[in-house]
Amino acid sequence: MLVLLPPSETKVSGGEPGTSLDLSQLSFGAQNPVRSALLQQVVELSGDETAALTALKLGPKGAPEVQRNQEVLRSPVMPALERYTGVLFDALGVHDLEPEPRAWVEDTVGVFSALFGLVRAFDPIPAYRLSFDSKLSGGPLAAQWAEVTAELWEQVPDFVLDLRSEGYRKLAPVPPGQGVFVSLVKEGPAGSRKAVGHANKSVKGALVRSLAITGAKCDSVEDVVAWGSTHGYAFDKDSLREGVIDLVISGS
């Protein structure tokens, strides 16, 4: 199984002294041509602070984010799950997991970002700023990632539990039959349930933490539903449609 998370807008600064980005150290190397092209576009864009603030949808206080992009090729790196921060990653709490669940995370969790595509949990990445809807000179990010999407999913032999947000999902949709996208919804009749709001990220983080602690092994939608019924997560199998399943959150 591969559990797929979105990145966070906020990122920890710094990294291991003396290191810098090395694309050969990132998982799923079929993406490297697009990674390289996007890095060049990001560095180019960051040379014009005003244009970069607009393209990255940042306000006047966003200058430090532009500077991160200026330095992205030479700044120090750290493991992806230590780089990303915020509600989801706080709820996952990889820092205080016991060795066995932490090993599960290392083997099972990936993050799909606008700049690096799919990386594994502890792949080393620098601090940067790029969102799924950012504007770069090479055109829409979804179109650029589409150049390697087929090759990417050929490198992923596992069943994919897709917990990305909709925007990141669209950059590289999981092929039909290879996994399932989880839609977090409030209680209600199937087909008319409303999306969970502010609790979305914390629920996803807690879900992955629970999967890790229990050492979950899910190779199908049926396995996911069965695991959920045992551990308090209401995956509604009857809601399954076009590769999407509802996870019904009580009291949301």
Image (tube, rainbow, N blue to C red):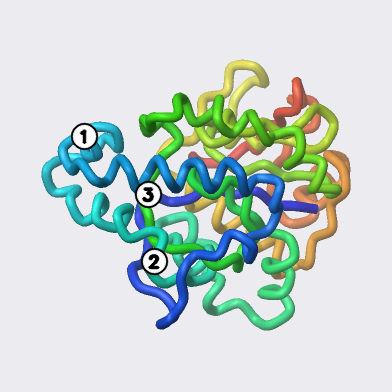
Q: Nearer the viewer, mark 2 or mark 3?
A: 2
Residue 154, compared with residue 167, is above or below; it is below
Residue 6 visible here = no
Q: Amino acid at mark 1?
A: Ala
Disc 1 packing (10 Å; few <14; some 14–19; many ≥20): some
Residue 207, compared with residue 6, is above or below; it is below
Please identify the quarter of the rendering in which residue 193 is found.
Answer: top right
User: Residue 17 vs residue 110: left or right?
Assistant: left
Q: Amino acid at mark 3?
A: Glu
Q: Which mark is residue 139?
A: none
- For image coordinates 56% across by 71% down, the residue present is 94
Q: Which mark is residue 51?
A: 1
> Percent position (x, y) of residue 147?
65, 30
Q: Nearer the viewer, mark 3 or mark 1?
A: 1
Disc 2 packing (10 Å; few <14; some 14–19; many ≥20): some
Q: Residue furthest top?
A: 191
Q: Which residue is mark 2?
A: 74
Q: Which residue is mark 3?
A: 9
Q: Amino acid at mark 2?
A: Arg
Residue 68 visible here = yes
Give the spatial CA distance, label 2 vs label 1. Answer: 22 Å
Q: Nearer the viewer, residue 248 or 97?
A: 97
The kind of secondary structure element at disc 1 is helix
Give the spatial CA distance, label 2 vs label 3. Answer: 20 Å
